Image (spheres, rainbow, N blue to C red):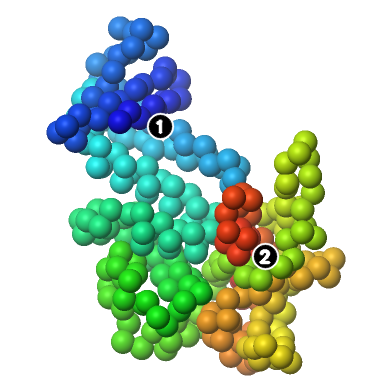
Amino acid sequence: MQFEVFIPGLKQFVFQETNAGILDLILDEQAGKDVPEKIATAGICFDFEELDKQAYLSWQGEMENSVIRSINYRFLVKAIKILTYAQAGATYKCGTWINHDFVSDKGLLSLFKKMIGDEKLQEIFFEYVLGQFDYGKNEQDVNNLTFMFGGMPRDLEEEAYNWYKKTKKFSTRVVGFRYRQERFVKVVNGEEILKMKPGQDVLVIREPENKYDNNAVSFILNNGEKIGYVRKTIASFLARLMDKGRIYQGKVSAVLADYRDEDERVYVELIWE
């Protein structure tokens, strides 16, 4: 297996994985002999096109040419990916990656917990655990997230309510968007693009008379177009708070690419003062 790495200001590096789990630097003709044996204060640039963002993995000090262990490199790449999407607000997607794609190594998970921070980790934990469509059936399957959270709470619903009660802002995915997305699609050069953009204001509306769920909380753009709802297992907590007078301000935090599941594409950040 090979990894191609582009370091800003320097040339392309190609790493090849050995049987010992080491990534050896291959000096090809283009990289040539002008590549220094030790690189100081270097970094790797990653492009996340669907977020229109870049992220950098950088290190300080000296890096030997052939002492990057592949498991550690993969961990860092996944960490950069999850941190970037978490900052953008795609919290449910981050929960999926942590739980299913992240290496189940307690040391690396503990390190990542320090990297992401307790507040963001709690946001991802509740968004993912409560946001699953089969919530209530497989809580014990969220092994990595549960470990990082410190164990599954004895009373998950009470812990979740207290968290949503105190947190000032969080992002959540828009469900039910699959039934409405055609209204928000425009075709540019044969490519479907959603008209919504991060930063766009969203009204957060309580719908107590909703015949399907009296705890319903919906998302509506300023032009009156409804884009979907809060997942009902999370809406049950927000509804209690909104019925007591809380008012949430909303804005689109992330819009993911069309190859994502329709109900994992749009995220809204909710804020209250």
Give percent across and percent down for residue 85. 50, 53
Classify 10 Å Cα crowding around label 2: few (below 14), some (14-19), many (20 and above): some
Q: Residue furthest left?
A: 20
Give the residue at x 54% y 80%: 234
Of 43 and 97, the residue lying toward us: 97
- The local secondary structure at tag 2 comes to helix
Q: Quadrant of the N terminus?
A: top left
Q: Is residue 263 left or right of residue 141?
A: right
Task: Give above or below for 57 relative to 248.
Answer: above
Across and down, in percent, residue 209 comes to 74, 92
Please give the count of numbered marks on the rendered protein: 2
- Tell me residue 146's x, y (percent): 31, 71
Label at residue 178:
2
Whole-percent x, y for residue 6 in the image? 43, 25
Residue wearing tag 1 = 44
Quarter of the image where the C terminus is located: bottom right
Q: CA distance from mark 2 to mark 1?
A: 36 Å
Left or right of 96 in this view: 1: left
Residue 172, quarter of the rendered image: bottom right
Residue at point 23%, 24% (across, down)? 24
